[in-house]
Image: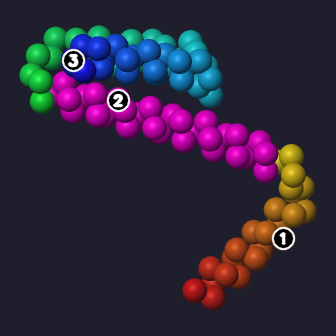
Amino acid sequence: MGQRSEVIKLYKTLIYLGREYPLGWDYFRPRLKTAFMKNKDVTDPEKINQLIARGQYVVKEIETLYMLRKYRTLKKRYYSDENEAVISEIYKKIESES
């Protein structure tokens, strides 16, 4: 796959992921566009590959952020604050024994 098509695919992926960004679409989109426009004149293939790899890392980080948000939401639904206090005490005991 050519580098141009990889960059376009990366941009589209980030645009898609940015719709649900915690700080909002209005925060995410201008920063994404600025990041891509800043590097539009790069012609070195190795540098382009590095930038693509960095973009793919950002995609993974954003996906992780979303998964964590979903996990926290589910955790709040099934565990009350009392249970969290008991669980945190258990974790503290385990950590102090280590």
- Residue 54 is covered by the magenta coloring: yes
Up/down of 17 relative to 68, above or below: above
Q: Please report the bounds of the magenta region as a residue range.
A: 47-75
Q: Residues within 10 Å of mark 1 (few under 14, many from 20)?
A: few
Q: Main secondary structure of the magenta part?
A: helix
Q: What's the distance in space between the residues labelled 1 and 3, CA to CA? A: 54 Å
Please tell me which residue lies in front, 42 or 53: 53
Where 40 sits versus 73, above or below? above
Q: At x 37% / y 21%, what residue is drawn?
A: 10
Q: Is residue 42 left or right of residue 61?
A: left
Inspect the image, locate mark 2, and give the three-letter code of the amino acid beneath it.
Gly
- The residue mark sitting in front, 2 or 1, is 2
Q: Marks 1 and 3: which is nearer the front?
A: 3
Residue 22's quadrant in the figure? top right
Which secondary structure lies at badge 1? helix
Disc number at residue 55?
2
| Circles 1, 3 touching at the beta carbon (< 8 Å) | no
Mark with earlier residue (2, 1): 2
Where the N terminus falls, by quadrant? top left
In the image, is 75 to the left or to the right of 39? right
- Taking depth in this image into account, of 12 and 90 the one nearest to the observer is 12
The residue carrying mark 3 is 2
The secondary structure type at the circle numbered 3 is loop
User: In front of the other: label 2 or label 3?
Assistant: 3
Give the number of marks.
3
Let me know if residue 71 is in the magenta part.
yes
Tell me how far mark 2 sits from mark 1, CA to CA. Answer: 40 Å
**Whether label 2 touches label 1, CB < 8 Å:** no
x 75%, y 69%: residue: 88
Residue 2 image point, x, y percent: 21, 17
Q: Dot 1 corresponds to which residue?
A: 86
